[in-house]
Structure formats: C-alpha cells, structure tokens
Image (spheres, helix red, strand yellow):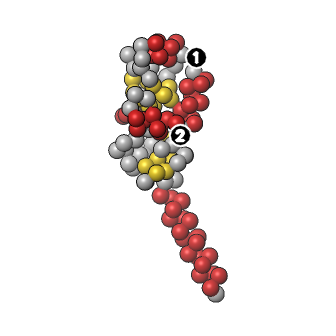
Amino acid sequence: MKNKVIAAIAVSIFCIAGTAQARCVGPVVNGDCLGTEVGTYNSNSYGSSSNDQNRYRSNSGAEYQYDLNRPGDNIRYQYDYDAQRRDSMSASPRRNLDKRSGQKGGGIYNSW
C-alpha cells in the first residue's frame, strides 16, 4: 500500500512539473524558458526574445530572434541550439553586412 501511495505522488508531481513548461525546448530557469518556445502562445513574454514581437531587425533588413548586444539575449542564444543552427546554415549576405557594421544578431529568420 505504501508503494502505491508513493507511486501515485510521484506520478502526480511528474504530471504537474511536466506541464508547467511544456512549450519550452531547452533549459528553464526561474520559470523562464531560456531555450526555444514552441507553439504560438507565450504565457510569459516578459524578458523573452522568442515571441515574434521582440524580433531584432538590423539595418540591413535581416530579422533575428536575438539581439546579441543585449546581455539577456546573448545568454539565451548560448542555450538555443536551434537559433545557432539557423545561423550556421545561413548564407545570407545580410549577415556579413551586419557583422561588418558591428550589429550582432543571433537566430536569423529571413535570408535571401
């Protein structure tokens, strides 16, 4: 009987903890997703660069998920492997223009 109670408590804790940040792929620190949030609903948009309203647009017109001149975005970018992958695969000439002008964007969205 004692094992069943412990198992029931463990399952309920796992279910509660599992749904708290179900939209976050990556580390969660103090309730904030430092990785990539999937889906369209962002329940905690304060301090998060992953929603569409906080995109960083450079002077060249390129859109990035992160503004790497901001310390918070720089830390989030270090843990966002999807954004790093997009940057490494991008052959956009806009990225080179941005780098030469000192603009630092991470997680490019559009390229031509």
Q: Quadrant of residue 101?
A: top left
Q: Which of 83 and 38 is in front in this view?
A: 83
Q: In this view, does 46 lie to the left or right of 111?
A: left
| Residue 27 pos. (x, y %) | 52, 48
Residue lying farthest bottom?
1
- Tell me if residue 91 can be seen: yes
| Residue 78 pos. (x, y %) | 52, 36
Q: Name the residue under label 2.
A: 79
What's the residue at 45%, 31% (across, down)? Answer: 65
Q: Is residue 81 left or right of residue 63?
A: right
| Residue 51 pos. (x, y %) | 41, 38
Q: In which quarter of the image is residue 104?
A: top left
Q: Earlier in the sequence, mark 1 or mark 2?
A: 2
What's the residue at 57%, 35% (across, down)? Answer: 82
| Residue 47 pos. (x, y %) | 36, 42
- Residue 76 vertical placement versus 63 (above, below): below
Q: Mark 1 points at which residue?
A: 91
- Does dot 1 land on a helix, a strand or a loop? loop
- Does dot 2 land on a helix, a strand or a loop? helix
Q: For the residue marked with disc 1, what is the amino acid?
A: Ala
Are there few (<14), some (14-19), or many (20+) residues within 10 Å of tag 1?
few
What's the residue at 48%, 28% (across, down)? Answer: 106
| Image quadrant where one finds the N terminus | bottom right
What's the residue at 54%, 70% (across, down)? Answer: 12
Q: Report the mark closest to the observer, 1 or 2.
A: 2
Q: Nearer the viewer, residue 94 or 102?
A: 102
Q: For the residue marked with disc 2, what is the amino acid?
A: Tyr
- Tell me if residue 23 can be seen: no
